[in-house]
Amino acid sequence: MRQFFSFIRKETRHILRDVYTLVILLIMPVVLLLILGYAVSNDMKNTHFAVLDADKSTLSADFINKLDGNKYFSMTGYLHSESEINNEFRKGLCKVAIVFPHGFENSFIKNKRTEIQLIIDSSDPNEAATIQNYLQLILLEFQQEKTSTGQVVFQINGEVQMLYNPQMKSAYNFVPGLMGMLMMIICALMTSISIVREKERGTMEVLLISPLNPTAIILAKAVPYFIISMVDVALTMLIGHFVMGVPVVGSLLTIFALSVVFTLAALSLGMLISSVASTQQTAMQSALIGLMVPSMLLSGVLFPIDSMPVLLQYLSNIIPARWYIEAMRSVMIKGVGLVDIIKQVSILLSMTVFLLFISIKMFKERL
């Protein structure tokens, strides 16, 4: 029995000496619990909407104020023509467009019924369904407020139009997201393990005495994973399009260029992890917990970013997968061009340059 307790003490001391493992065991469950239980939610908040008001009446103004005053919606501005609606959606400036036709108020007063058009971006079907339910509830409340007896005598019909994904297929949303997750696994995880493996085996020093400098060696080891990632992008798009029926509306060249930039950012992350980690186990834990978990929860794949607390919204800005998935959805589903996603591309390029510089600098210092 003494030997048994001695072994327990030995294992406990081993865990306490490994600060990194101790942090994972104690801190990560708390962080995940706070994110999953408090911050992350399927509820939609601050959904941006634009208004095309051809009636310009008191009734339409009242409904706009009611919608804008609700915690679930936030108005971005007024539109002047129907052609502007599609541009707003393509640029990602709004999720909903409210269209008031001519005679909206007159029809409401004379005929006791009128119509309003609700145009919703349904590239994310779960998000679109939630938005539609919220709009219908607010519309019903507005009707009741306009009826003095408390019974719904007046009727406002909401004509709903789903853009980009009228069939409400979930594959439209998850295929671009899965592309980001797969590339993150291949690039960041496998690259970090590959370089650390050389350190553990003691072969990195042998490579460093070759004619190539350390930077060239690291980049050379990343090239195969870059090629594999590009092949995976092509395979994922082929399966998504021909098997799952996901359209590829945008330019293939734009999709390829965006994937190249994101792959370089993911490879840079893998190199940074390899520069810090001393063992393959540490590298794997860092990649899975430090990259995969935040990428799944804060990239917009599973939960809407606009509904998260402000702190997590800011934190999501440093997640490369967020910008790739956001841009890929716009290109594949909405058919936007490179000019419309220049913000996402610029952020990914900046991340790549910064991470590559830091990882190479830290690697030289360690060796």
Image (cartoon, rainbow, N blue to C red):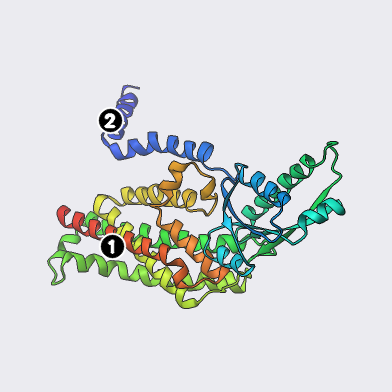
Disc sitting over residue 353 in the figure = 1
Tell me residue 138's x, y (percent): 71, 45
Quarter holding the C terminus is: bottom left
Kindly identify the residue that appears in the image at 44 percent across and 59 percent down: 323
Q: Which residue is painted at 39% across and 51% down in the image?
A: 291
Label 2, label 1: how far apart the Cα atoms are: 40 Å
Look at the numbered disc 1 and give the secondary structure of its residue: helix
Q: Sort mark 1 into few (<14), some (14-19) or many (20+) by Cα contacts within 10 Å.
A: few
Disc marking residue 13 = 2
Residue 39 appears in view: yes
Front-most of residues 230 and 177? 177
Q: At 84% from the left edge and 53% from the top edge, which residue is drawn? A: 113
Displayed quadrant of residue 17: top left
In terms of secondary structure, where does tag 2 sit? helix
The residue type indicated by label 1 comes to Val
Residue 134 visible, this orientation: no
Q: Quadrant of residue 1?
A: top left
